C-alpha cells in the first residue's frame, strides 16, 4: 500500500525510512503527518523510483549508516568494506584513519566517526547520497534530502540540508 502524498505549498513531500526508529527520528525534527512516511527496509532504490513515478517532488531519506551508504553507492545490497573505504577516502579520511577497520564490520566505522565527532564525514556522506540519488533519478524538479540516523538514540546526526 502506498502512502498518500503530504502536500506542502503545492509540492508533494514524502519520507522514505529504513525502519520505525528512523521514522521517529525524522518525525521528531520535521513533524510531518504520518501519511508522509513509508517504511521500506532494504527496498530503498526501488522505493525511491516508485515514489518519484507516483508524483513525489521532494523525498527525504531517513536511515542508518549502512542504509545511507546504499543510496550513496546506488545499490540495494550492503556495500563491501572496499566500497566504503573508497567513499571515506573521497570524504577526506586517510589510510591511517581507515586502517583500524580493515577487518571490521562496516557499522563499526559509523560508531568511530560518530563518537570521534567526525560529523564532517557523516555530513559528506549525506550530501553524496543526495547527489547520487538525484543524478540517477534524472527527474526534473525532484529534490532528495538525506538524513543519517543514530538508531541507538533515535536521532538524526547528519543531514544533506
Image (cartoon, helix red, strand yellow):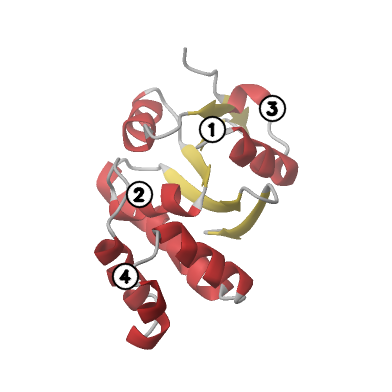
Quarter of the image with the C terminus in it: bottom right
Q: Is residue 95 above or below residue 106?
A: below
The answer to whether marks 4 and 2 mark residues whose Cβ atoms lie closer than 8 Å is: no
Kindly indicate the quadrant of the structure image that contains residue 104: bottom left
Which residue is at 43% across, 47% downward?
67
Mark toward the viewer: 4 or 2: 4
Which residue is at 36% across, 31% downward?
43
Circle 4 crowding by C-alpha within 10 Å: few under 14, some 14–19, many from 20: many
Q: Secondary structure at mark 3?
A: loop
Q: Is residue 83 left or right of residue 64?
A: left
> Along the polypeptide, which appears first: circle 1 or circle 2?
1
Question: Who is closer to the viewer here, 88 or 160?
Answer: 88
> Along the polypeptide, which appears first: circle 3 or circle 1?
1
Circle 3 crowding by C-alpha within 10 Å: few under 14, some 14–19, many from 20: few
* Residue assigned mark 1: 14
Give how far across and how far down residue 152 sits, in percent. 65, 50
Q: Is residue 143 left or right of residue 33?
A: left
- Tell me, yes or no, if residue 138 can be seen here: no
Which residue is at 68% across, 37% downward?
24
* Residue assigned mark 2: 70
Mark toward the viewer: 1 or 2: 2
Mark toward the viewer: 3 or 4: 4
**Mark linked to residue 85:** 4
Amino acid at each position: 500500500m502506498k502512502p498518500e502524498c503530504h502536500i506542502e505549498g503545492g509540492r508533494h513531500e514524502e519520507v522514505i525510512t529504513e525502519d520505525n526508529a528512523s521514522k521517529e527520528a525524522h518525525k521528531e525534527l520535521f513533524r510531518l503527518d504520518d501519511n508522509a512516511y513509508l517504511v521500506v527496509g532494504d527496498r530503498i532504490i526501488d522505493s525511491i523510483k516508485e515514489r518519484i513515478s507516483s508524483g513525489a517532488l521532494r523525498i527525504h531519506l531517513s536511515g542508518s549508516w549502512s542504509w545511507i551508504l546504499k543510496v550513496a553507492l546506488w545499490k540495494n545490497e550492503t556495500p563491501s568494506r572496499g566500497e566504503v573505504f573508497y567513499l571515506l577516502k573521497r570524504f577526506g579520511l586517510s589510510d591511517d584513519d581507515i586502517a583500524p577497520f580493515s577487518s571490521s564490520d562496516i557499522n563499526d566505522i559509523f560508531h568511530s566517526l560518530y563518537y570521534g565527532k567526525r560529523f564532517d564525514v557523516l555530513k559528506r556522506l549525506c550530501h553524496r547520497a543526495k547527489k547520487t540519488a538525484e543524478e540517477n533519478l534524472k527527474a526534473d524538479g525532484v529534490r532528495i534530502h538525506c538524513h543519517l540516523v543514530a538508531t541507538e538514540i533515535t536521532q538524526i546526526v547528519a543531514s544533506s540540508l
